[in-house]
Amino acid sequence: MGKRKPGAARSSRRLFDVSWATVKHRKGGFVAAFTALFCGSAVVTACGILLMSGLTSGVAPERYAGATVMVGGAQTLPVKEDFDPFHAERATLPAATAEKVAEVPGVRSVVPERTVGMTLTDARGDTVSPGRPLYGHGWSSAVLAPFRLTGGQAPAGDRDAVLDAVLAREAGLGVGDTARLTVGTTPATYRITGLVTAPRLARQSAVFVTDARAAQLAPRADQVTAIGVFGDPGTDPDDLAARIGRAVQDTAVHTGRDVGDLEFLDVGQSRGFLVGLSASFGGTALAVVIFVVSSTLGLAIHQRRRELAMLRAVAATPRQIHRLIGGEILLVGTVGALLGAVPGFLVADGLRAAFARAGVLPADFALSSNPLPALASVVLCVAGARLAGYIAAFRVARIRPVEALSESQAEPRGLGRTRLAVGWALILLGLGSAVVVPLFVPGQLALAGAGGSLMLLMIGFGLIGPLAVKLAARMTGPFLRRSRVSGYLAAANSTANARRLSAAVVPLALAAAMALMQLSTLSTVTAEAERQAASGVVADHVLTGEGTGLSPELADTVREIPGVDTVTPVARSRVMLHYKEIDKYQTEPFSAQGVDPARLERTLDLDVREGSLGELRGDTVALSWTAAGTARLGVGDTADVYLGDGVRKKLRVVAVYGNGLGFGDVTVPHGLLTRHTTTGLDAALLVTTKGTADDARVTAALDRLARDTPTLTVRGSGDFAAAQEADITQQSWTTLTANAVLLLYVLIAVVNTLVMATMGRGREFAMLRLIGTSTRQTRRMMAMESWVVIVTAVVVGVLIALPPAVGASLAMTGRAVPQVEPLVWAGVAAFVAVLGRLSVGVPTRAALRARPVDAVSTGE
């Protein structure tokens, strides 16, 4: 490589010196830019950490920790050019797979393992809950941890059991005692023959029975949960795993910490959740950060019009102006982004804790400490700031020096044609994406269009913002001028300095629009789910379980009760629809339920719009209108469905219904769904009596059944409806939590921008005071200007939030009227008003403390 030219080095050094001198001299504008980049880097870093954690993090294995290699079913669905989604249910293996694995060279022994969810109850039927899930296993799998007998002996008969010592101590049980263990709602009494301990057992409790008994209790005796492999002495685990993967197809082979994904189904699902959320949220966050930084830099450069005009007048070229501003931005942006990346780890941890409290992440899920997200955040933020600075300085660098000097004293009368054209085009595009797309393109694409329209509308308004400010100034001018001095000055300033006020209005309007849209969407989803669930459950009684679920045979028991007319078992899961969208195949997850179609109308009303649920038998499916619209399917078409455990099915669509938010977007025959769930159990039984005369008798019989059946609870239809809404509400609040961080950043940017805009007018305040305006009149002038900004921002925020809210309502409910809580919207407007007023009033008082003569003679 050749040596760097001395002239280039001296030029770079001079550029750095000039940039550093400018930054020191004009601290106000650069502090604002630094703050925007510092906070923006923290937000983007947090998104990157969540994404990296979803790709690489997990928890350490416990029951499988002692095995060389663990083999399980494929728990993810491979998707080209995208992240692989996780299946909702356990992907099991045929029991015969163990023989194939045992034939692989280097394998010393294999241990098939079955996991069965259980509940420990006392003599009265009350659940003994240690705060951890309880799983039963065959005794041969105890070596996988390994578990060690600390008392008693291994189980020998079908009613023998070995408990882990911690569970036994918490339940007050010991060797020789009896324990009542329930699978679903089917209890059995076992004699405790021994106690065991393991090197690590923190996330679960364990019970061991004989292998034959474990096969009886498992949902499918021909399937195993996993296969533990012990290699020959000296065998490398990764090499052995590779050989097994090549020899035995349709399996997932795990070693080391990755075994935790196989052992704990919730960990893999949490990783998938983090990847999906952070990927979508991260893109939005980066767009908002660049938008806010652009607005801040635009205002900072606007306040330097006179300085930059003088440079142009003394023969500075456009390239030199861009290099000067670029050097300043690189200096401030690099420092701000580097320092902001550090608290980004704290922001990510705060989000992790919030998601754990919401129940979508395990409490012990560890975040990745990889520095790559921080480095990527710094590069993206600095590059975005550099681009924003170039755009903001484009006009002042390109216009003729005489025009630059003229514009440094007064703003240009109009906006450029290109700026206006792009602004209006983005607004029209945003309106089309928000409202027109949901009218003609149903399903998830409509919802995505409505959500993405907010940024299009916001950027479009940012470009034409001065026109809105001038319009607001003209409309409020007659009211302002009633105050002869302060009002006249406020009206004149608002009209003459529309660009400056627009820089203050834009972030305030963005904050209002984001808050209003998110709250409106949450209210719409919650209200619609409540309505559908409340109107859809027409059964008289609902039976649910407090443990792992309801045993399938319970439905027959309830049917035998005199006075019972219809019993509908309901199973729950999540499935994935595979469909073609334009020229690319997509895979979208949807909540699913399995029901018995016999006399279904007596217990459940799904608001069928096409077809009939009576045909829901065999390989058939009914779809909500949202799912049907997403996959472009109708009655008679074939849906490509991946069931909860990853088994692919081609199902004929027999009905399209409306109550998808309340009951799930995919409905399949009951047996088809339960055969592909982890437990094979029901979530609820819907019970209808033959008539009002039978209600009291049936109610009494169900209450007796609940007392005699562990974990069984009798509920009203209203309670069941509330449970149906939980999943939707949880998802909505999770999204709202993530967006709350972004909204907090926008609020910081609002304060930052308003304070910078106000403090930058110190010279103007001093001139007003020197020509006779009192301090009180100046403060009143700023108060009136702030109300122009606040009212404009609130009105614009409402106008920007309404189209996406309408579009989201169309996409989710089919109605163009979103759920609007007047008090909530009024509260957002009041908060924006208080924030704007304080952000202007406090720095105004600070700026007026200086003597007018001193303020006029200083730059800032």
Image (tube, rainbow, N blue to C red):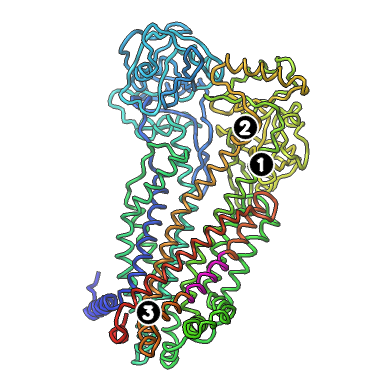
Q: Is residue 326 above or below residue 49?
A: below
Residue 445 placed where, x, y %?
62, 53
Q: Name the N-terminal-most of marks 2 and 3.
A: 3
Residue 527 placed where, x, y %?
63, 46
Q: How far is mark 1 from mark 3, CA to CA?
A: 55 Å
- The quadrant in which residue 332 appears is bottom left
- The quadrant in which residue 616 appears is top right
- Residue for point 33% across, 48% down: 370
Q: Nearer the viewer, mark 2 or mark 1?
A: 2
Where residue 292 is drawn, which disc sits there? none
Q: How far is mark 2 from mark 1, CA to CA?
A: 15 Å
Instruction: Check if mark 2's residue and mark 1's residue have beta carbons within 8 Å.
Output: no
Q: Residue 531 vs residue 326: left or right?
A: right
Mark 3 crowdedness (10 Å alpha carbons): few <14, some 14-19, many ≥20:
many
Q: Quadrant of the C terminus?
A: bottom left
- Residue for point 70% across, 15% down: 561
Q: Is residue 76 above or below residue 388?
A: above
Q: Amino acid at mark 2?
A: Phe
Q: Is residue 405 above or below residue 235?
A: below
- Residue for point 54% across, 71% down: 792
Residue 116 lies in magenta, yes or no? no
Q: Amino acid at mark 1?
A: Gly
Q: Main secondary structure of the magenta part?
A: helix
Where residue 720 is drawn, which disc sits there? 2
Where residue 322 is drawn, which disc sits there? 3
Magenta range is 784-797
Instruction: Check if mark 1's residue and mark 3's residue have beta carbons within 8 Å.
Output: no
Q: Amino acid at mark 3?
A: His
Which residue is identified by label 1?
660
Mark 2 crowdedness (10 Å alpha carbons): few <14, some 14-19, many ≥20:
many
Q: Is residue 270 visible?
A: yes
Q: Is residue 614 above or below residue 390?
A: above
